[in-house]
């Protein structure tokens, strides 16, 4: 961390006892004279500007650990690795490697190898590294993986990560399942070589409610205009498929109503074609969608489609709006680059850049992405010729952008059969309706009948509490959830108590539905009334590292938090009074903006707010631009309370100019990625923050 451009001469006097050398975070372009340090066991050259993998390294035969990540290395010469027989740990991520030397497999002690964020097209040379346990090759250009690497008995691989590659064999979805899934994939391919090859494009229809997404999607499928009745609005996501020539389009029609954004983080995935639908006859929030797409899928291709042209005054108005939207989008994209560069510069100039290393890396990553937004296509969805034009344009777009979008996957026959079976089920509409994630959940709970309540052993009075808690606290009681899901299931299957119990759960046992909802962070477990915990340990700043919170204990008879359903803040305001910023603050920095919907899923649990000074204080969050501020507040009557607030228009709040002042601790980006943080400070006790899984952005 000394900004060195070369290693100072006085350091290069051979020191025979020197076993470890740390030159990270400098500006070295090459490493010379390193061969003198023949006793080196550990060498750290990460975060420099090294262009070549120095041949001298082959003299370091005792080397066990080598960091060369975050450099500009383009190639590694042959003849080095056969000499590094002791090397166990090698980190080469964030370089520009397009190829691996063919003799890397002679580095036989290697157990950990990180090659993520390079330009590799093949990892075939790694076959033969029998001791390899952990291999990371994320974000490269890999299309196929060598099956021998995963052969049982020939390697010890237990961790393998390959997300962010255009993989076809095995497809990325298989890799996401881990080593065992990949092994099983190759095994099935071997057993039955009649593999099925599919060219698939995930096509996501996004846009505000009533913009015309379903109309477009269904018309595209039919090849002619289809009218969608207003009452026939999308709930959740409709997934259908369409073949145009040899390309299979998976059409994902996302519901536009806000409540459904709750699940968007699960389904908006990279390498997809986004059809961003804008109602031209209506003022649309295009910035919101572009922003959202940039944050979630920054390398997507976006096709802008303006609907309702027929409802505009005339062609001039249509053209004017088209020009206006295209200009706005271009400005947004350009501005974002400027902001990212500015933020990077700011961080690099900071007094202690090592605190922000992760953030700078993330910024570099974001700067590498290029959201491609195509010119706006204006349509009147009621006209056949417009739909035909749309259809041919989509195909043209795929053909010209196929590198990004058209993922070809090779699947064993059995996988294909399962997929087809799911499609048949879906088309037969044998899949239950969305029961929990829906716009009218409050009404659904209100409508629970006396009979259903009795079967759950609940009273009318409890139902009123459920409704009240859903509206005023965003919590849905598990008993209500059980009733709603069971009611839906009973429409499909009669009298299968085992199945109901497994899916829905009981008072004592959590059902699959709850586990899944929590796994995908659609909701979070919460206690209906969380008790205060006077035993929580004190935190003394500087003495201890912050620890991640333990998995909070779930209560199958408790409640789940769905903050998006919080509609009524009145009870909270009456109970807690006006916002008063108190004296404990924790600032958290996010890059570069916080995705919309983030706070809808952000929860603060008040575990222990119990001390002479701080009896029953509320914790709340303020979000200002890219900053999140945790503020303690006074509670009027001292009881503990789980509360989530939505802060409409919060980005307009004024920033405190000096974040350091009064701030107890920074969360670095690394902390935030932990998903769970225990935030502790000063003479307060502890509070737990649970973050939704944030994407790499
Ligand atoms: N006149 C006219 N009506 C359109 C056009 N496109 C869509 N509509 C109508 O607009 C209404 C809303 O369209 P939908 O396709 O349901 O909108 P959506 O975006 O899927 O809405 P959500 O399901 O709420 O997300 C429907 O009544 C459509 O018939 C168009 O180009 N011209």
Image (cartoon, rainbow, N blue to C red):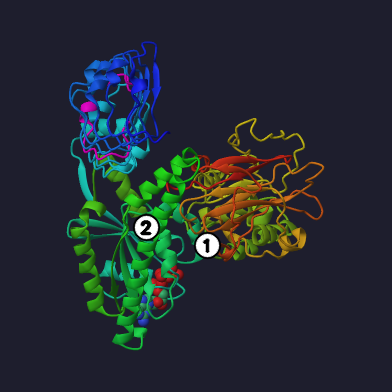
Image location (x, y in percent) of residue 452: 64, 56
Q: What element carries label 1?
A: helix
- Give the number of the disc on residue 155: none
Q: What element carries label 2?
A: helix
Residue in the picture at 56% in, 47% down: 504
Lower position in the chain sequence, tag 1 or tag 2: 1
Which stretch did the figure color magenta? Answer: 110-132
Q: Residue furthest top?
A: 16
Residue, disc 1? 259
Image quarter (top left, top right, bottom left or bottom right) of the N terminus? top left
Front residue (pair 511, 552): 552
Front residue (pair 606, 416): 606
Image location (x, y in percent) of residue 591: 47, 51
601 shown above or below 214: above
Q: How crowded is mark 2: few (under 14 residues within 10 Å), some or many (20 or more)?
A: some
Residue, disc 2? 337
């Amino acid at each position: 961390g000394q900004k060195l451009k070369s290693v100072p001469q006085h350091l290069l006097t051979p020191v025979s006892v020197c076993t470890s050398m740390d030159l990270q975070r400098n500006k070295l372009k090459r490493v010379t004279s390193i061969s003198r340090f023949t006793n080196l066991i550990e060498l750290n050259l990460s975060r420099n500007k090294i262009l070549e993998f120095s041949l001298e390294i082959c003299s370091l035969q005792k080397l066990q650990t080598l960091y060369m990540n975050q450099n500009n290395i383009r190639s590694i010469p042959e003849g080095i690795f056969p000499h590094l027989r002791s090397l166990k740990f090698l980190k080469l991520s964030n370089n520009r490697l397009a190829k691996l030397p063919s003799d890397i497999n002679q580095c036989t002690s290697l157990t950990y190898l990180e090659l993520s964020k390079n330009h590799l097209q093949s990892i075939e040379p790694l076959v033969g590294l029998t001791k390899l346990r952990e291999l990371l090759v994320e974000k490269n250009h890999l299309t196929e993986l060598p099956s021998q690497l995963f052969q049982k008995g020939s390697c010890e691989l237990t961790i393998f990560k390959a997300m962010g590659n255009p993989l076809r064999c095995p497809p990325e979805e298989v890799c996401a399942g881990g080593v065992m899934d990949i092994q099983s994939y190759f095994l099935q391919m071997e057993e039955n070589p009649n593999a099925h090859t599919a060219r698939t494009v995930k096509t996501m229809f996004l846009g505000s409610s009533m913009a015309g997404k379903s109309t477009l999607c269904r018309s595209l499928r039919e090849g002619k205009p289809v009218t969608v009745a207003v009452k026939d609005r999308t709930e959740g996501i409709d997934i259908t498929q369409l073949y145009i020539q040899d390309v299979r389009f998976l059409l994902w029609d996302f519901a536009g109503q806000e409540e459904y954004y709750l699940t968007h983080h699960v389904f908006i995935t990279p390498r997809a074609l986004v059809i961003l639908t804008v109602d031209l006859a209506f003022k649309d929030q295009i910035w919101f969608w572009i922003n959202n797409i940039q944050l979630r899928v920054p390398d997507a291709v976006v096709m802008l489609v303006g609907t309702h042209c027929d409802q505009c005054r005339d062609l001039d108005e249509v053209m004017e709006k088209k020009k206006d939207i295209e200009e706005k989008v271009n400005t947004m994209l350009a501005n974002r680059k400027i902001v990212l560069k500015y933020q990077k510069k700011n961080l690099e100039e900071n007094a202690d850049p090592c605190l922000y290393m992760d953030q700078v890396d993330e910024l570099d990553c974001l700067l590498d992405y290029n959201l491609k937004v195509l010119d706006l296509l204006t349509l009147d969805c009621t006209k056949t010729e417009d739909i035909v034009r749309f259809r041919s344009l989509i195909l043209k777009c795929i053909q010209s952008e196929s590198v990004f979008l058209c993922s070809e996957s090779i699947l064993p026959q059995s996988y294909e059969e399962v997929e087809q079976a799911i499609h048949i089920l879906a088309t037969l509409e044998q899949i239950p309706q969305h029961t929990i994630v829906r716009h009218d959940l409050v009404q659904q709970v209100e409508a629970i009948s006396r009979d259903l309540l009795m079967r759950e052993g609940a009273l009318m009075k409890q139902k009123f509490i459920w409704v009240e808690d859903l509206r005023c606290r965003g919590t849905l009681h598990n008993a209500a959830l059980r009733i709603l899901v069971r009611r839906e299931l009973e429409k499909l299957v009669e009298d299968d108590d085992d199945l109901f119990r497994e899916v829905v759960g009981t008072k004592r046992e959590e059902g699959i539905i709850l586990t899944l909802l929590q796994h995908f962070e659609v909701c979070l477990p919460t206690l209906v009334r969380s008790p205060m915990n006077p035993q929580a340990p004190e935190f003394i700043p500087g003495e201890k590292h912050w620890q991640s919170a333990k998995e909070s204990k779930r209560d199958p008879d408790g409640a789940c938090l769905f903050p998006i359903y919080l509609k009524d803040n009145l009870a909270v305001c009456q109970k807690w009074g006006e916002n008063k910023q108190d004296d404990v603050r924790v600032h958290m920095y996010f890059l570069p903006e916080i995705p919309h919907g983030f706070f809808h899923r952000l929860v603060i649990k008040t575990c222990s707010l119990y001390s002479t000074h701080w009896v029953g204080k509320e914790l709340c969050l303020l979000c200002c631009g890219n900053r999140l501020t945790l503020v303690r507040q006074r509670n009027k009557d001292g009881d503990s309370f789980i509360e989530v607030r939505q802060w409409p228009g919060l980005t307009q709040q004024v920033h405190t100019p000096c974040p350091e002042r009064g701030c107890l601790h920074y969360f670095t980006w690394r902390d935030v990625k932990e998903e769970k943080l225990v935030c502790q400070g000063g003479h307060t006790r502890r509070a737990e923050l649970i973050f939704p899984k944030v994407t790499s952005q």
